[in-house]
Image (spheres, helix red, strand yellow):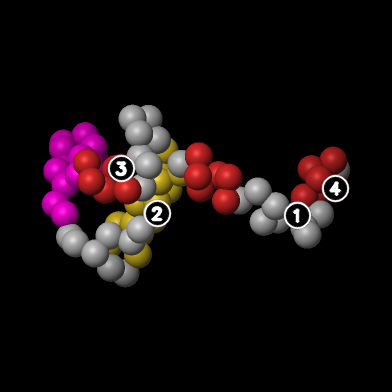
């Protein structure tokens, strides 16, 4: 995944829908139905797509934490 260097405009619709340009959808592997984390930042609204690649990147990240023991309680 490359960081986009050019600014692209999207469209906003009445019901809060956002159209993300095709180039960015391809770059970030965003498909129809992809969920996104939406966060308010001092610069504006940040959208982080939750893709298969992102979920795979989390594997083993929290291995050192006692998550299973906590869930068993």
Please report contact status of discs 2 and 3: CB closer than 8 Å, yes or no.
Answer: no
Labels 3 and 1: the sequence-earlier one: 3
Q: CA distance from mark 2 to mark 4?
A: 35 Å
Q: Is residue 19 left or right of residue 40?
A: left
- Which element is circle 1 on? loop
Which of labels 3 and 1 is toward the front? 3
**Residue to which mark 1 is pinned:** 63
Labels 4 and 3: the sequence-earlier one: 3
Q: CA distance from mark 4 to mark 1?
A: 12 Å
Q: Quadrant of the N terminus?
A: bottom left
**Residue to which mark 4 is pinned:** 69
Of residues 71 and 56, the one nearer the viewer is: 56
Query: Which residue is pictured at 61% across the width and 51% down the height?
Result: 58
Query: Which residue is pictured at 22% across the width and 41% down the height?
Result: 22
**Residue to which mark 3 is pinned:** 26
**Residue to which mark 2 is pinned:** 1
- Which element is circle 2 on? loop
Residue 40 at x, y percent in the picture: 35, 59
Q: CA distance from mark 4 to mark 3?
A: 39 Å
Residue 52 at x, y percent in the picture: 50, 39
**Figure label count:** 4
Crowdedness near tag 2: few (<14), some (14–19) or many (≥20) residues, C-alpha within 10 Å: few
Labels 2 and 1: the sequence-earlier one: 2
Query: Which residue is pictured at 35% across the width and 58% down the height?
Result: 2
Q: Quadrant of residue 41?
A: bottom left
Dominant secondary structure of the residues highlighted in magenta in the image: loop
Residue 62 at x, y percent in the picture: 70, 55
Tell me, yes or no, whether the highlighted magenta stretch contains residue 11: yes
Crowdedness near tag 1: few (<14), some (14–19) or many (≥20) residues, C-alpha within 10 Å: few
Q: CA distance from mark 3 to mark 1?
A: 31 Å
Labels 2 and 3: the sequence-earlier one: 2
């Amino acid at each position: 995944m490359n960081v986009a260097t050019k600014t692209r405009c999207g469209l906003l619709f009445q019901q809060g829908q956002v159209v993300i340009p095709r180039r960015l959808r391809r770059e970030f592997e965003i498909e129809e139905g992809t969920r996104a984390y939406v966060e308010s930042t001092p610069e504006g609204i940040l959208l982080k797509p939750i893709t298969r690649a992102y979920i795979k990147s989390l594997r083993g990240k929290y291995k050192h934490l006692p998550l299973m023991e906590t869930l068993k309680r």
